[in-house]
Amino acid sequence: MRTIKFSIQHLALLLLVLVVSSSMCLYWHRYDKAVLAALESRSGLKPKALTDLYPSWYGARELLLHRRDPYGVDVNRELQIAFYGKELDPSRPEERINQQRFVYPPYFIFFMAPLCWMQFHAAQTIFWWVQVACASFQLFLWLRFLRLELSQITLVALFALILTSIPVIQNLSILQPFLLAACFLAGAAVAVVNGRLFLAGTLLALATVKPQVCLLATAWFALWACSDWRHRRTFLLGFTTMLTALLLASEWLLPGWWREYPGALRAYAEYTKASTFLATLFPEPAVHGFLTVLIVTVVAVFCWKARSMPPGSTGFAVALSMVLTLTVCVVPAMVQPFNHVLLLPTVLLTIRHWKELRQNSFVVRASTLVFCISALLPWLLAAVAIGSPFVAHNSWFLEMWSVPLAASMALPFAAFGVLILLWKVTPLEATIPYGIDDST
């Protein structure tokens, strides 16, 4: 009887995951259509749904096939025409929108090279599957990083929820290369834990295809490596070797690119009006400035204390998770919350130490519950959002979007809270053992 009951519980879990995951996919599909319609009515432009991949694909194609500068004015104009049917006029307020420039380091073109010799529709399809693979493999890598073993049923449910979470589904819908960089970052963390420091440095250098994703993580790894130079210098050797190779290859591919790239970044920041997560939630400069200083100080203090801890320890995992959560909060992004993918290690750390958190004081249990609710609520709210009306209605979906988004926006704060709790209630210097009681 116990076996039958256990099987029914798993079936109910999978059915619930299927419902909420399907709801999220349907909700996001309808929301995308509503946003596109709203943009058309507001600006008078009719942008094509070419996704964020198109500027990368087109810029790489023009450089590799026609030896044209992807940062050049002509390529920028052609990208605008492809998206909007005309060259944008910055003097008109309604046209001060995303100019769709090529804004990546030139070595990102090496990742785009296999797609340059095919039509964009085929390239788009292949890159979508690559992004799905990156999202899935990233979860696998973080599980390895934390030495977390779960049952097959739990893994299926976890993979389904992660792949249909707001950050991942947003990245997949706009085909942002963010997931590629995040996957390299997770690979670097696993390589460090396994003692393959040169490989870890190499993978971290590859993650710089999205420099803002790994900037703070690189600073943490550098601090950790320098705290035991004799045994950890190989990490910095691997990082500098690969990064130097990438920069030299970029100079060979596009001589003088380093003079144009800063200008492309400045222009991107100006026309996208990218802001930090804290500035988005707290527009008042004094408020988000104070919160930024406070959070940076807390993370810096903990990282300084954890700098000498072994890579397989709880303290090392908490420190890296704190740095990634800080990245979500203080690094500017054009669209929130697609970079919340970096909060995945914190979610898995909570699962890893569920027993310690559950068996602690009332405050610890309540704070952990808040984090769990913040993590799971967007799926439930998405299911509610598509429940009525059944026929898509643009204005209704734009209003309802704020509800699951608000729950998602609370996650970084809840993540900081649970990480501070882990700092207090777990033995930080103890090595994380393999396995976990899957009764959680």
Image (cartoon, grey):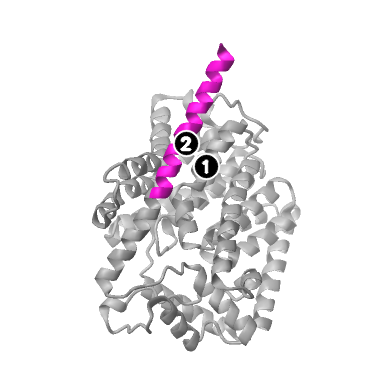
Is 99 or 296 nearer to us in this picture?
99
Is residue 6 found inside the magenta-colored segment of the image? yes
Q: Residue furthest top?
A: 1
What predominant SS class does the magenta segment belong to? helix
Q: Answer few, some or many: residues within 10 Å of disc 1's Cα (few below 14, many 20 plus, some between 14 and 19).
A: some
The tag on residue 17 is 2
Q: Residue furthest front?
A: 391
Image: 148 above or below 265: above
Q: Residue at x 28, y 60 (%)?
A: 283
- What's the CA distance linking mark 2 and mark 1? 7 Å
CB under 8 Å between discs 2 and 1: yes
Q: How many marks?
A: 2
Above or below residue 274? Residue 299 is above
x then y, percent, for residue 194: 72, 46
Q: Residue 114 appears in which quarter of the rendering?
A: bottom right
Q: Residue 435: x percent and y percent?
A: 65, 31
Where residue 160 is drawn, which disc sits there?
1
In the rendered image, the quadrant that contains the N terminus is top right
Tell me residue 208's x, y (percent).
Answer: 59, 65
Residue stretch rendered in magenta on the structure: 1-26
Picture residue at 62% right of the left edge, 49% below the top = 137
Kindly indicate the quadrant of the structure image that contains residue 16. top left
Q: Amino acid at mark 1?
A: Ala
Residue depicted at x 29% and y 62%: 285
Q: Is residue 290 visible?
A: yes
Left or right, 241 with respect to 402, comes to: right
Q: Amino acid at mark 2?
A: Val
At a point 48% along the width and 27% down the height, the residue shown is 12
Front-most of residues 70 and 129: 129
Q: Secondary structure at mark 1?
A: helix
Please tell me which residue lies in front, 278 or 272: 272
